[in-house]
Amino acid sequence: MKRTLFLLLLLPVLLSAQGGMWLPMHLEKQNEKEMKSLGLKLEADDIYAPNRPSIKDAICQFSGGCTGEMISPEGLLLTNHHCGFGAISEHSTLEHNYVEDGFWAMSRADEIPCPGETAMFISRMEDVTALALLGVTEAMNERDRQSQIDKNLAQIRVNTKKEKWEEILIRPFYNGNQYFLFVTVTYTDVRLVGAPPSSIGKFGADTDNWVWPRHTGDFSLFRVYADKDNRPAPFSADNRPLRPAHFLPISLEGVAEGDFTMVYGFPGRTDEYLSASALRQTAEVTNPVRVDIRDKALKTMDRFMRNDPAIKIQYISRFASIANAWKKWLGEMQGLQTYKAVAKRQEYEAEFVRRINQNPDWKIRYNNLLPRLNQTHKDMEPYAEARDNYLETFLRNVQVMGLASGLTNWVKTYDDGNLPAFSAKIKEVDGQMAGAFREMNPAVDKAVFAVLAERFAKTMRPEWGGAYVKSEAERLGGFDKLADYLYANSALTNPDRWASLAAGDAGALGKALSQDPVLVLWRGVSKPYQEQVVPKLQELQSGLNLLQRQYMSAQMQVFKDKRFFPDANGTLRLTYGKVNGYSPRDAVRYEFRTHLDGVLEKYVPGDYEFDVPKKLIDLWKAKDYGQYAAKDGRMPVAFLGTNHTTGGNSGSPALDARGNLVGLNFDRVWEGTMSDLNYDPAICRNIMVDARYILFIIDKYAGAGYLLNEMKIVKGKRK
Ligand code: ARG
Ligand code: ASP
């Protein structure tokens, strides 16, 4: 009785947690009321409308993994510095080091074409669940179910009306319980317009990453071009700036604590509806494995990078990307522990069970669901651990093993006696190898290999590959010796050896590769994994998919009083909340905003993470902030909100109650990185660059104020 009462009291908290990444087409039904109560001054269809211009027409997915937005009627695109980093570094040379010094096009002619960068807009979306699940029955096994769905989706694609420059994308939602279709338009002529130096755009680098208080001006500017009819077209000098159906006005008013904000973008992936058992596994088993492996790899790389500036440049981007997920997983597992995510999820499950027990129908259908889910997670545990161990060790962190895995099928054509097929691909592989050699320093990779191979031998079950690696090390006199041997004798670790082999006789190349010590080791490691781990993984995963889909649908039925947003899946979503600081632990309270003064507090002259450009220091000393200063005369840099965001939301606009851009999303706070699995409104915050800081840097710092002429700047229209 006491427990029930406790649960009933807790219920509002369990069920009303704010957060969520909502479907734009359902805002009116699901969110408009709440959004208005939080301060929204627009109607749902100002944000998303299928047949007339709305805010969604200003939002695009930038190059597949980030978000960007239109901030002028002439295709000017705003995104993060770290989202544009690939393009910025690709065009950097020692003479024109845009990474170090920044880049500013002072006219349209100076803009730099960036092949490979894309901007994908959404024309409209549709719920196609009924058609997608046509003929699907509960009795079907997963394979038959999927093939029926695949057939249905193909049919939907054929029947959907679209223009010839449009594309169709269909994605499962709610673990496959629903399907939505998106009609998209992708522009490929994207040009770099501006980027601050890394000492602004990446200020604080890895040390400050995922951490508040934050002082990073994480933004860059691009321009999207289209053909004369405003349609997507490959790069051409004749192309014209895109005229988007909507672009975002930028507000100079700033934000105050409690203000409504919303973030519109393309969140990549979340798992908010897992069982407590799955959360526990992430916190206690899989994240620790991944974190430990990356920790070892990063420490090894760091040693080399500190001693050699050339290695530092070569590895900076790789290091940042390995460190980004490493740090997030660490924060995530700590957050799950600290904020008792497993216990809270168990309380939620207890309420689920209590409710199904009161309904005879549910009781029959769902009684076994959680026990089976828990059992399957338990069965999965050793395999999931092995999977992460294997993938992180060899495929993610040892470069040469990743290479070996990519070459295996090709070398097999030689081993199978198909010399023509083997020869036909030499040139292509040679090109890939050239790229791989540019990104690899064999001494660094060898050191990483030695450390990780030793860890693998100790932690991987003997019969799943652990014994093999151990015996190879013993045979050669230890892990360092094994590493020496491999890197001294392989063609994949030595550009000259590779070049002379690749230029010579195809048969000799095939023979050398099929005996190459790195490829031999890779085969020895991957064989037991493929044979003994993968089949079991696939079987268990397919069981889990089914159970999780049923559990998702059961939760939606049983908790009718709760609104469920679909997990992020790389599609367009809106999240909203309030500008808000937070209290991570007793007696500690973080304010919601940082200032340029804080940049100078962190300033370490000459440091690669915390240096500050002289011009910025001068502007700060003179308090020369122009119209961009806050009302208190200070220069704001970043602020926090309760918007529920994840990877892929980087570059998303933060909008005020009227749809003006007030910030640019780029990160989350350390204590709240668990939000992909367990959004807790008390602690999870997204971090945005203040729009005024962006304009200040463009205008006052870079002297590219001409760009503001094409923007719509809003002043004094608050509330
Ligand atoms: N943590 C942010 C995100 O997940 C920013 C990453 C870029 N910054 C960095 N220092 N690596 O993408
Ligand atoms: N920094 C992330 C991104 O690049 C955003 C996040 O994970 O909060 O998308």
Image: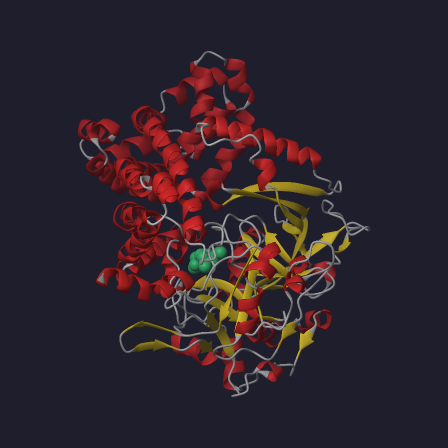
Q: Quadrant of the N terminus?
A: bottom left
Residue 308: name its quadrant: bottom left
Indicate the quadrant where residue 585 lies: bottom left
Answer with left or right where residue 124 lies relative to residue 505.
Answer: right
Q: Is residue 94 left or right of residue 206?
A: right
Q: Residue 80's spot in the image, x, y percent? A: 54, 61
Report if residue 480 is visible in the image: no
Q: In the image, is residue 222 above or below residue 625?
A: above
Give the quadrant of the C terminus.
bottom right
The image quadrant where one finds ligand 1 is: bottom left
Question: Residue at coordinates 23% horizontally, 31% vertically from top-left?
Answer: 466
Of residues 307 and 563, the one drawn nearer to the viewer in this rendering: 563
Residue in front for this viewpoint, 41 or 615: 41
Foreground residue, 694 or 267?
Answer: 267
Residue 329 lies, in percent from the top left, at 34, 53
- Please report the residue visible at 40 percent of the width from the left and 30 percent of the height from the top: 404
- Which colouring convention does the figure follow? secondary structure
Residue at the limit of the structure toward the top, as seen here:
417
> In the depicted view, which residue is nearer to us: 141 or 480?
141
